Each structure stands twice: as C-alpha cells, then as structure tokens.
Amino acid sequence: PNIVLIVADDLGSTDLGCYGADDLRTPHLDALAARGVRFTDHYVTAPACTPSRASLLTGREHARVLQRNVGLEAEETTLAELLGGNGYRTAIFGKWHLGIPADHSPQSQGFDEFMGFKVGALDNYSHTYHWGAGVGHRLWKDDAAYHEEGTYFPDLVTREATAFIDRNHRRPFFLYLPYNQPHYPIQPTTASLQAVAHIEEPGRRHYAACVQVLDEAVGRVVAAIEAQGLSEDTIILFLSDHGHSIEEESLGCGRIWPCGPGGRATPYSGHKGTLAEGGIRVPCIASWPGHYPQGVVRQQLVSSLDWLPTLADAAGLSTTGLVLDGQPLGPVITSSTATVHAALCWTYGMLWAVREGRWKLMGSGADDISLYDLELDPGERVNQLAERQDLFRHLAGVRNRWAESLRHDPTVIRELGL
C-alpha cells in the first residue's frame, strides 16, 4: 500500500472533535477516524519534537538514535530508507527537525524529495526563523534555499503533497507530512479565525483556528488520494508529536498580543515538556479502507515506536536485521487483543516514567516520585506512592531494567540520569 504519515505539531491530547473537544471544528479528521481506528492510549516517546520524531521514523528509543546537538544518527535506518529501498517513492513536506547538516538531512535519511524547514519553527509567511540563534530564512526545497515569501506555509505543504500524489499514483509511495500546526508562531488565517468565532477566550480561539487549518489540510490530502482512486491502496496514519505547548512563544497569537495558551489535554494534566499524560499521550488515527476496521476505538497501550514495524508488515517488508523497540500492531488494529507491550517507559532529561496497565510511576531523578492509578485518576492528582509500596518496587524494577538496557546499548551517546 501507499503510506501517508501526517504529524501534527504541539496538538493537545484531546484537541480533536473525535477525542471530545466540542468547541473545535475538525470534520476531516473526525471523518478519518470514522473510516478507521482511533487509539485512546497512544503514546509518543518524548514530550518534545526532535526525540519524538526520531523514534517515530526509526522504531527505536530516542536515547539510542539521537546524536547530541546534531540530530538523527546518520547510520540509523528510517522508515523512508526501508520503504525507498523496496521500490517506494518517498517525500517529506513540512518540518524535519532531525538535523541541519547535509549528512543529517532528509535526503541522507531516505527521502527522495523535500520541501520544508529543518529547524524547530518557522514564520508561516516570511519563512524565517526568529527565535534564538540562527535567525534568517529557513525554507528549503531539496538541497537549496527556496523562496516563496507570502505564501502560507501549510498551503505550501499541502500543494506539494497533492502534486506528489498526482505524480506518483501509478507506483507505491511514502508521503511524510509533518505539518507545523498548531506550533508557534500562532498565525491562523482570517477564514480559520472566522470559523471558530464562537470561542470567546482569545488564546483558545487562535489555537483552535490553527487546528482548523490543520484539519482542512488533511481534508485536501485525503481528497487527492480519493481523486486518484487510491483510498483502498493507501494507509493514512495521523498523530501528534506530543502534547500542547505553553511555551512563551505560543502565548502571542501570531506575535501580536499576549492572550494565553490555547491547547488542552482534559481530563489529563501536563503539557509539552512533561511526562504527565498531557505531554506524551496523543491523538492517533489509522485508516486503510478494506483492511482496517472502520469507526473502531482501541484502548490498548500503543507506542509511536510500533508504527515502523507495523507499516513494514503492511507493505510485506522484513525488518530482520533492524534492532527495534516497537512491535507490529496488526492484531491490536484488527481486534481487541491484548496490548503488545507489558509496559512502556520514558526518559526526558532527568524526567522518567513507566506505565504498566492502569498504573503509572514517574519522577525526576530520585526526587518527586509519584504513583497514579490512571483508570480512576487520569488527571494524575492523587499520589498513591505511600499506600502502594509494593507497586512502587515492582514498577521501579521495570523502569530500572529498561534504563539499563539503554545504558548498555553501544549506540547510547549520553548519560540518561536514570
């Protein structure tokens, strides 16, 4: 099958209509969920852009595959390299954020075509980077700087995506679309703002308008697939790279006036940069008409690590020879079978967490350790550490064994603090 991987940037854990956000307008993503499988307990490996994307594209823990201050290790095998080596035409249009040097670029990691930016954020109209070091024009097309100032960046991505689908409809393709919405700068279009005029709170309204932009873009990509008669030959996978942002740059509504962050994770706590549920539990929808169930909700524990082996399986490709942390999700997608993971673990700086079943243990180094029952307390408000020392000892052991596996892996390039 063709594979279209769409990644939202800083989308809140429950900020789609199909996830319960009744104030947002996401008809195209809701329709995608109605035609596919929606996951309630889908996690990414980190609450930040680069490590999360590194794991998604490699099926490996980010602590194994990232080179400090550079990006994705050149010798890692990405989904694009795996598919491209087996006859797929591959492209990325959008945000790369896995390395700027040539040997860490999309082209060095298996992508035939690239249009987008390699840094963390971009002004949607001037296509410049305004934050910290490296201020300047940052839009690329393949290996050269690309100039189309004034054209709204999400429209550029969608235009390239639909043209790619039209050009390659007679051969298998892998299309990776890491959109930059609703990441800062918060720059919704006039039309998208009008569509959410019913939202009174300014921060939420501007954020919702950016989510509207994302939803409309997804709708145009799906329409291009349908126009070529490729629906039953195309897997569409949608997810966010992590939870919503409360970073200072996200408070400015297009860098005009401060109006507060707009993302939400209700009923969860936390946000981007944290290992609370709102930082790492993300929306995820998988659609493949005629192959995946339609309108189904799965509650099993699922990780973004699982998508490389899952998509490889769907394409009939072997992953023998790759050392993966993810597991194929075929049985989970097609039935209510048990999760493929006994537990999931996380590390991010000094933060760590482990979830097994309904229980989650988390901390910062040896401090601020807490234990939560996610079934009764999804907002992680009642620390049961003192009452459940038996669970603490068990989950700490699970976490420590996982941490040791990272520390002893010869590709790990930094101390994890675990």
Image (cartoon, rainbow, N blue to C red):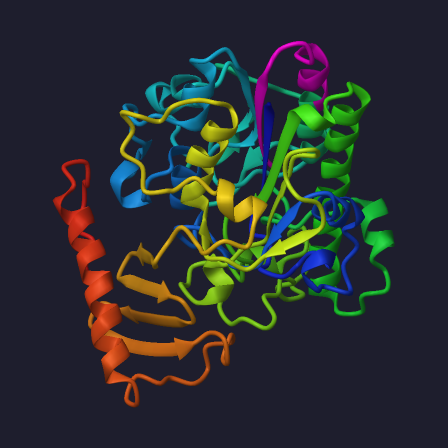
In this orientation, does residue 149 appear?
A: no
Residue occupying the point 77% across, 46% down: 31
Question: In the visual, does 385 lie left or right of 238?
Answer: left
- Where does residue 154 sit, x and y in percent of width and height? 68, 35
- Taking 274 as reference, is 296 above or below it? above
In this orientation, does residue 28 appear?
A: yes
Residue occupying the point 77% across, 18% down: 228
- Where does residue 178 sit, x and y in percent of width and height? 57, 36
- Where does residue 100 sit, x and y in percent of width and height? 39, 28
Q: Nearer the viewer, residue 315 or 112?
A: 315
Residue occupying the point 19% across, 41% down: 412
- Tell me if residue 152 is in the magenta stretch: no
- Taking 219 as reference, is 299 above or below it? below
In the picture, residue 396 is in which quadrant? bottom left
- Tell me if residue 171 is in the magenta stretch: yes
- Where does residue 380 sit, x and y in percent of width and height? 46, 77
Quarter of the image with the C terminus in it: bottom left
Quarter of the image with the N terminus in it: top right
Q: Residue furthest bottom?
A: 387
In the picture, residue 94 is in which quadrant? top right
Q: Nearer the viewer, residue 316 or 326?
A: 316
In the picture, residue 60 is in which quadrant? top left
Q: Nearer the viewer, residue 393 or 214?
A: 393
User: Which segment did they paint magenta?
Assistant: 162-178
